[in-house]
Image (tube, helix red, strand yellow):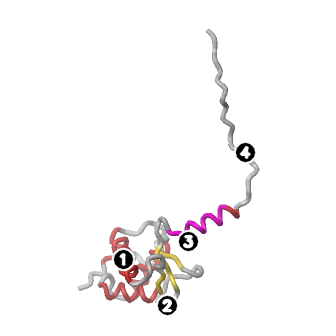
Amino acid sequence: GSSGSAGSSSGGTSASPLSDADSAVLARAQRAFGRDRKKRNLNFYACDLIDWLLKSGDFDNRADAIAFGQRCVATRRIRSVTADHDFGDDRCAFRFVSDNDSLVSKAAEVMQRSAPLRNTAPPRISTTTTTTTT
């Protein structure tokens, strides 16, 4: 019996964090997909995740499963591998994102290195002390 409770929130994407129910579904999906793939390669096709969500009983229909995937993209829990693709019922590749995701870390490094250098020096800390006499 599928409850569909994880997909009962409003449609559309939101930047708010995932609900507890959605987070639990995502964690199960990540574990299930991780078993079938090399540990360092958690890429998957959107349609494969949708199929899994339906088979697992977490969602009753493809539209709710797609909305779940879109919430995961909006909250940056999954991301498109090649470009900024919307999550849909297709063979676009996505990957699970974790706090220590090396791709995210590398992207942040590149962005930091490519930012224009500012011509500001850090504040100097004085090493001399002043004494007052009374």
Q: Secondary structure at mark 4?
A: loop
Disc 4 packing (10 Å; few <14; some 14–19; many ≥20): few
Please report the bounds of the magenta region as a residue range: 101-112
Residue closest to the eye, 10 or 74:
74
Residue displayed at 50% across by 69% down: 101
User: Which callout, 2 or 4, points at the residue further toward the start of the chain?
Assistant: 2
Closer to the eye: label 2 or 4? 4
The residue that disc 1 covers is 31
Q: Is residue 129 left or right of residue 96?
A: right
Q: Secondary structure at mark 1?
A: helix
Residue 9 in magenta stretch: no
The residue that disc 3 covers is 103
Cα separation, mark 1 vs mark 3, equals: 19 Å
User: Would you say the residues marked 2 and 4 are in contact, meaning their CB atoms lie under 8 Å apart?
Assistant: no
Residue 127 versus residue 78 in the image, above or below: above
Q: Amino acid at mark 3?
A: Leu
User: Would you say the residues marked 4 and 3 are in contact, meaning their CB atoms lie under 8 Å apart?
Assistant: no
Residue closest to the eye, 42 or 3:
42
Residue 121 versus residue 99 in the image, above or below: above
The residue that disc 2 covers is 90
| Residue 127 position in % (x across, y down) | 66, 30
